[in-house]
Amino acid sequence: MRHLSYTERANYCLSPLAKRLLQLMDEKQTNLTISADVTSAQKLLELADQLGPEICMLKTHIDIISDFTPDLTHTLRKLAHQHHFLLFEDRKFADIGNTVKHQYEGGIYHIVDWADIINAHSLPGPGIVQGLAQVGRKKNRGLVLIAEMSSAGHFMNVDYIRSTLKMAEHTSDFVIGFITQHALSADPHWIHMTPGIKLETGKDALGQQYITPKKAILEHGTDIIIVGRGIIAATDPVAEARKYRESGWNAYLKRCEK
Ligand code: S5P
């Protein structure tokens, strides 16, 4: 069977946000997400502005910013609108439903007010999805469940991954897909996002493991490449982002031909 394009797959989505993301990728011709893991607000905004035209999503770790003010997330939203990308806060929620509701909505960061997408571990069971959905659904947000990590020695075995997919299946109007190294399902509405990406395979000193964009998309069947240091630590992040963008996009085009 021919692989469907992102736009064709958008028709199968119950979540309006998943639909938007799939359409945006084809319109903009990019399946690249930048992981903007920097600690200063100014640096984050610079990256968002410079790399905005190249990406479908900007992934943040808002709690590593040392000079956070609400102005940062207002400006990020403006840049997301201007350059046509979505904001993904990599919060990795991992608690009971009632606690994650507060963490998502309140505190200093008010994540639900600015992040289109958040992620969570499936480990606590379905309550975590229900809690986040109570906050995020009314704002048309989307949740990505972490099924399989990129780090060496993680405990996410085949049963865990399978159970994560099963848990998501009950809430596909809010859960839009997975953080994973391999596609989990052929259902066209699920969006599979892969971190641990570099143009050359390898690892870092703390257990991170890298595969190439081509391997993730063509061999492992995933949809979005998430790249951090491969781009942001380069001397010319824009030129480097274009290389990743091209590599990820060509792999997708090739997959569509199959
Ligand atoms: O399994 C995972 C899941 C995530 S979200 N492995 C990861 O590395 N991540 C995140 O992706 C991680 O928190 C970091 O923000 C980014 C990878 O960064 P890089 O510099 O190694 O590309």
Image (spheres, rainbow, N blue to C red):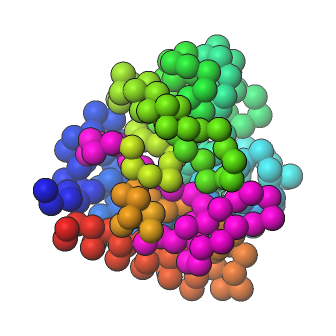
Q: Quadrant of residue 107?
A: top right
- Residue 128: image quadrant is top right
Q: Is residue 8 visible?
A: yes
- In the displayed orientation, state which residue is furthest to the left: 1
Residue 190 included in the magenta stretch of the image? yes
Q: Is residue 106 above or below residue 21?
A: above
**Residue 160: % across, % down:** 53, 32
**Closer to us: 249 or 57:** 249
Name the residue at 76% across, 61% down.
38
Question: Residue 173's x, y, as percent?
Answer: 35, 29
- Give the extent of the magenta segment: 185-214
The x and y percentages for residue 18 are 36, 43
Q: Is the C terminus in the top left, top right, bottom left or bottom right quadrant?
A: bottom left
Left or right of 234 in this view: 198: left
Is residue 71 a member of the stretch shown in magenta? no
Q: Main secondary structure of the magenta part?
A: loop
Q: Nearer the viewer, residue 81 or 135?
A: 135
Q: Describe residue 44's horizontal placement relative to residue 172 as left or right.
A: right
Looking at the image, can residue 112 be seen? Answer: no
Quadrant hosting residue 112: top right
Q: Position of residue 191 (x, y in %)?
A: 38, 47
Q: Residue at x 85, y 52 (%)?
A: 67
Point 75% across, 66% down: residue: 204
Question: In the rendered view, does 203 fall on the left or right side of 241?
Answer: right
* Quarter of the displayed picture in which ligand 1 can be seen: bottom right
- Asked whether 195 or 70 is in front, the reply is 195
- For image coordinates 55% across by 38% down, the residue present is 157
> Dividing the image into 4 quarters, which one contains the N terminus?
bottom left
